[in-house]
């Protein structure tokens, strides 16, 4: 998993059926000091995350699993909302 | 997932049997300001996108998780057509509007 | 597998149900010679690692599901599986 910050949203009305109803957020990956590191990604939301929140997201095949229909092509999904990093 | 623009198609008549019937699109990555940024990729297209459209695509083994690409040797798939996106409350792209990026004051 | 240094913990209340009770560590990935790379990961803990400990970690889903015994629906990838005492490189 990686740390990231929600910086925006993406709207898509025509998408694969398994992702209908899933919220898409733009996530900026962060390093350990919560500074941006690398290019932003679009991630599916499983935790009702909001703009500005620090989250953890999972990449790869596992990203499909937390969503309502697990047979979906997501390669990044938010798995938790971070309260504190120390 | 990444944002990208459809810039072309790939036609291949001689290919692995498992890939017959899968259309391929050439995509160029977009940055958050809707500008082309570096990389390009060939992705399977299960939904029928048009040239010039802005799409979302997914890479890796997740790309096999659509009905069209199930159990096929595929590593990138288009999963949606993007209507709009915003960053920090500022709209950066809208399908039916032209948005000129604001230049930051010097 | 990768070698990493524990640089912190990540605390979260709103998370996937299967994550409840698991400790999340912030790990900086190291080169074999011990220099830090730019990569940081959030990994689950299976070796009671503390701050500045050097750990061996898996960053692959199938193995992580076996280690954490989550069954096929486990949304896990990175797990610290061992504490590294030393690394010897052939000269």
Image (tube, helix red, strand yellow):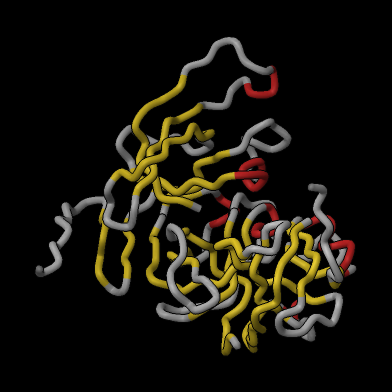
What x and y, as percent, mark residue B66? 63, 43
Q: In the image, is residue A65 above or below residue C22?
A: above
Asked whether, in this view, residue B54 is left or right of residue C84, the answer is left
What residue is shown at x 85% (from left), y 75% (from top)?
C46
**Figure check: A59 above or below B89:** above
- Answer with the quarter of the image where residue C66 lies: bottom right
Q: From the top left corner, tell me how far across and down residue C47 is, in percent.
A: 86, 77
**Residue drawn 59% across and 54% down?**
A74
At horizontal 37% and vertical 36% (from top left) the residue drawn is B6
Quadrant for the N terminus of chain C, please. bottom right
Drawn side of residue B11 relative to residue C41, left or right? left
Quarter-wise, where is residue C58 in the image? Answer: bottom right
Task: Give coordinates of residue C39: x percent, y percent.
Answer: 59, 62
- Residue extending furthest toward the top: B14
- Above or below — where is B92 with respect to A52? above
Q: Residue at x 53, y 33 (%)?
A: B44
- Residue A60 left/right relative to B78: right
Quadrant position of residue B17: top right
| Placement of C18 over or under C21, stated as above or below | above
């Amino acid at each position: 998993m990686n740390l990231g910050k929600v910086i925006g949203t993406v709207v898509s009305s025509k998408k694969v059926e398994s992702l209908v109803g899933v919220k898409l957020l733009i996530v900026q990956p962060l390093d350990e000091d919560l500074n941006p590191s690398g290019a932003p990604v679009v991630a599916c939301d499983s935790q009702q995350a909001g703009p500005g929140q620090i989250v953890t997201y999972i990449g790869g095949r596992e990203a499909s699993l937390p969503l309502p229909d697990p047979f979906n092509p997501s390669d990044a999904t938010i798995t938790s909302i971070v309260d504190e990093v120390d | 997932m990444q944002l990208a623009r459809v810039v072309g198609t790939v036609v291949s008549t001689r290919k692995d049997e498992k890939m017959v019937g899968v259309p391929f699109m050439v995509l160029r990555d977009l940055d958050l300001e809707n500008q082309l940024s570096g990389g390009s990729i060939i992705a399977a297209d299960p939904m029928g996108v048009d040239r010039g459209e802005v799409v979302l695509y997914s890479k890796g083994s997740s790309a096999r998780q659509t009905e069209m690409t199930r159990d096929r040797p595929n590593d990138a798939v288009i999963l949606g057509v993007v209507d709009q996106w915003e960053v920090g409350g500022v709209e950066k792209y809208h399908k039916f509007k032209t948005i000129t990026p604001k230049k930051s004051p010097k | 597998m990768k070698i990493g240094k524990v640089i912190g913990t990540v605390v979260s209340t709103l998370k996937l149900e299967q994550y409840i009770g698991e400790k999340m560590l912030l790990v900086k990935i190291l080169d074999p010679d011990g220099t830090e790379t730019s990569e940081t990961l959030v990994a689950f803990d299976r070796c009671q690692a503390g701050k500045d400990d050097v750990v061996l970690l898996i960053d692959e889903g199938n193995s992580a599901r076996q280690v954490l015994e989550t069954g096929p629906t486990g949304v896990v990838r990175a797990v610290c599986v061992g504490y590294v005492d030393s690394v010897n490189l052939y000269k």
